Amino acid sequence: MSGTDGPQGDHYFTARPASAGERRAIRVRLAGRDAEVETAGGVFSPDHVDLGTQVLLRTVPAPPATGDLLDLGCGWGPVALTLALLSPDARVWAVDVNERALDLVRRNAARLGLGNVVAATPDDVPVDVAFAALWSNPPVRIGKPALRELLLRWLPRVAPGGEAWLVVGRHLGADPLQRWLTEEAGLPTTREASAKGFRVLRYGP
């Protein structure tokens, strides 16, 4: 589900977890440490941490130490795993519609010894959970109506005093999205950084 560039369409909705033969290990850097994780085709950016996510992770402040944290559109897990490494006493929700992605997140959390990651579909997150932080490289290529619906569902669940951080490609509509969130959706959002063709947006109730 995650990602502001990359494959479109059914690629985000793979129902079947990857088989052992389809999974492969890659080396990445997460939360300042080298880590080996598993990825597979059928998820966003399976060979590396994509540039937009790199920009997000380099820009955002440290997450809260406790509470519920959300990676919206988790893919194979670079954001969720980073949140879990940085905040071991928090509960990290890794949310995606792609069951293959969720299976990979669970495997990667176990591989890294992270017991605080909960990989879940959107409907499996209890409605009473409010998030101290939301980090996301949202799936812009699902289209404007679906993206707006996604953000309208999740941004209001950021707790008072919490923050949502989004990274969106400038050429994929970051500036119009910020204006829409602020002026029409009633979710005042600021541009906090620009780097390598991406905008980093912040929402805080």
Image (cartoon, rainbow, N blue to C red):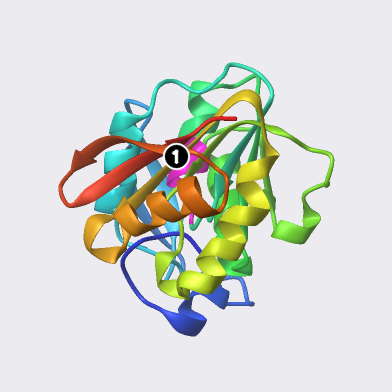
Q: Which residue is mark 1?
A: 189
Quick one: quadrant of the C terminus? top right
Q: Quadrant of residue 104?
A: bottom right
Q: Residue at x 40, y 72 (%)?
A: 141
Amino acid carrying mark 1 in the image: Thr
Q: Main secondary structure of the magenta part?
A: helix
**In this rendering, does residue 166 appear at all?**
yes
Residue beneath the point at 31% across and 62% down: 173
30 or 170, nearer to the observer:
170
Can you give x and y, in whole percent of width and height, for residue 184 in the image? 52, 54
Rendered location of residue 30, percent (x, y): 37, 34
Name the side, left or right, on which 85 lies relative to 89.
Answer: left
In the image, 14 versus 72, the foreground residue is 72
Q: Is residue 29 above or below residue 50?
A: above
- Residue at 55% x, 71% y is 146
The crowd level at tag 1 (other Cα within 10 Å; few <14, some 14-19, many 20+) is: many
**Magenta region, residue range:** 76-81
